[in-house]
Amino acid sequence: MGQTAHERLREYLGQLPPNAQSLLMREFERAIERGQDVAVATLVLEQLRKVARPAPPAAPPAEAPRPQSPVEAVRPASRDDRRQSGDGARRLFRPLEPFLTDSTGPLRPGQIRRASLLAVWQWLGREGAPEKYAEFDAAMSASHDGSREVEMAARKLQLATAEALMKLVGPNATGDRQRALARIGAPSVIEDLLPIGLVLQNREALDGLNGRLPGIIRVLGDSQIASVNEAINVPSLQTPLMLPFALSLVMQRLAAPWQIIRLATKIAASDDEIRVAATPFGVAVTIALNDLAGLASVLRADIRRGHFANLGDTLKTLHDGVRGLRTELDLRSESNWGKQLTAIRADISNALQSEIDSVPGRARRILRQRADKDIPAGAGVDGSEVEEVAALIEFVAVCRNYASELAINEVTLRTYSDLQQYVEKATEALVQSLRSGDARARAYRQSQVSAAIRFCHVLFGNDYAQLMSRSAENALNGERKSSRAG
């Protein structure tokens, strides 16, 4: 690629919004780590980092020239530049990793947008903490990640980052905040500045909590609640702004994340939502509800894409979460929490019901009897469509287990019963059709029988499917004998 092409690529990348630049940077870094298209990824990353960290504009003629910061005075080579923008940012923001989300919409308490980190990283080198930024960059260039020098430089930059952010967005912020914030990034980035500063400022307390929690908490019972409460009982983690991050760490260790609400009911010594909401730990209920809403969105997206393989696990998590919130909290239907849970159930029900309703029709299109004259020579049933419908039938079967809590009881039971009756009758009729009819259409009917037996396996089990398979073989053998006798 010539120099002109480099310039065109750099010009195109420079026109992208910061969030798109950040996303591209992450994807190409991951591609390099996986060893995919290394040459292309390295080239694009090199050009992307040049436009993502542009040189500062020249000072107006009426003002004295602005002195260079240490970062600008010593511009690293391209290899070090890649390390600084990739490994350096990851190392600096490592304490934030448990709380990062790829969502760009509204966040629940205890979350930070991953896309905001690039803007903060660039701002640190530009004006946020240029001296500590340069020291950290030098340590990363001179030592390998994980060395004592890098660790010390990272911690100094983390503290400097927290201090600089608190001056901008903390309770005692001073100066022209609006202009300073506008130079950092978009409103969504500004919204993340205080959480980023607080987490970096309280890294030791969060690390201590992380070390005291068990690897996995299968059931958050009374003894586990006592030990978790003791671990969280640190003054810096008990503030309204930091408690959601501490609870998020706990939630990640729970086999059933919804059980985080038990910390709130234990502190309130009541399941009454008013008493629970009056405690600082009431935010645990908000976190649990928001996570269920996010999981419902994932369910909707998987259904739209036709991804049914892991829906059983998602449905179980949603079912257990909804049931847990309904049984362990006394929620009023007119309260904010009550309305949110009702909306989540309705969202899940609508997503599932529309898909469940479509399954019988798709099965009928495959298994319906057609006249011999309507079957062209060489026709057959599409195997991929058969497997897709079989997955949908299995999906309906799974939904039966969770139908009550997810408000799909009636449609699920009706659809499953209709499928059983129709597939049973259709399979018997198709097997009988193998005994007679036009030989030209027999291949198509055999493919229909194979599809019907596949559906029987899902609906009635292996024994019944094998029985129908033997019946189909006997029907074909009987037809062959009859043909030879004739």
Image (cartoon, rainbow, N blue to C red):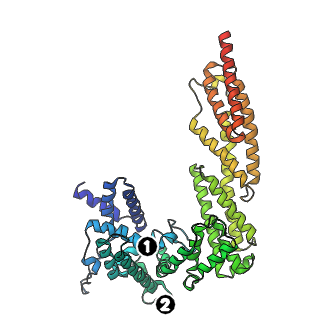
**Can the viewer see residue 274 in this picture?**
yes
Q: Position of residue 222 (x, y in %)?
A: 70, 74
- Taking the image as shown, residue 230 lies to the left or right of residue 153, namely right
Tell me what residue is drawn at x 26 percent, y 87 percent.
Answer: 63
In this rendered view, identify the residue nearer to me: 115 or 365. Answer: 115
Among the 4 quarters of the image, the one containing residue 70: bottom left
Query: How many residues crowd around disc 1 within 10 Å: few (fewer than 14), some, or many (20 or more)?
Result: some
Mark 2 sits on what residue? Answer: 172
Tell me if residue 222 comes above or below residue 36 in the rendering: below
Q: Which quarter of the rendered picture does the N terminus lie within?
A: bottom left
Q: Which mark is residue 385?
A: none
Tell me what residue is drawn at x 43 percent, y 80 percent.
Answer: 181
Q: Which mark is residue 93?
A: 1
- Taking the image as shown, residue 284 lies to the left or right of residue 47, namely right
Tell me if residue 416 comes above or below residue 13 in the rendering: above
Mark 1: amino acid:
Phe
Q: Position of residue 337 (x, y in %)?
A: 69, 72
Classify mark 1: helix, strand or loop: loop
Callout in the foreground (2, 1): 1
**Number of numbered labels in the structure image:** 2
Among the 4 quarters of the image, the one containing residue 434: top right
Classify mark 2: helix, strand or loop: loop
Tell me if residue 27 comes above or below residue 447 in the rendering: below
Q: Which quarter of the rendered picture does the C terminus lie within?
A: top right
Among the 4 quarters of the image, the one containing residue 277: bottom right
Mark 2: amino acid:
Asn
Query: How many residues crowd around disc 2 within 10 Å: few (fewer than 14), some, or many (20 or more)?
Result: few
Q: Position of residue 329 (x, y in %)?
A: 73, 72
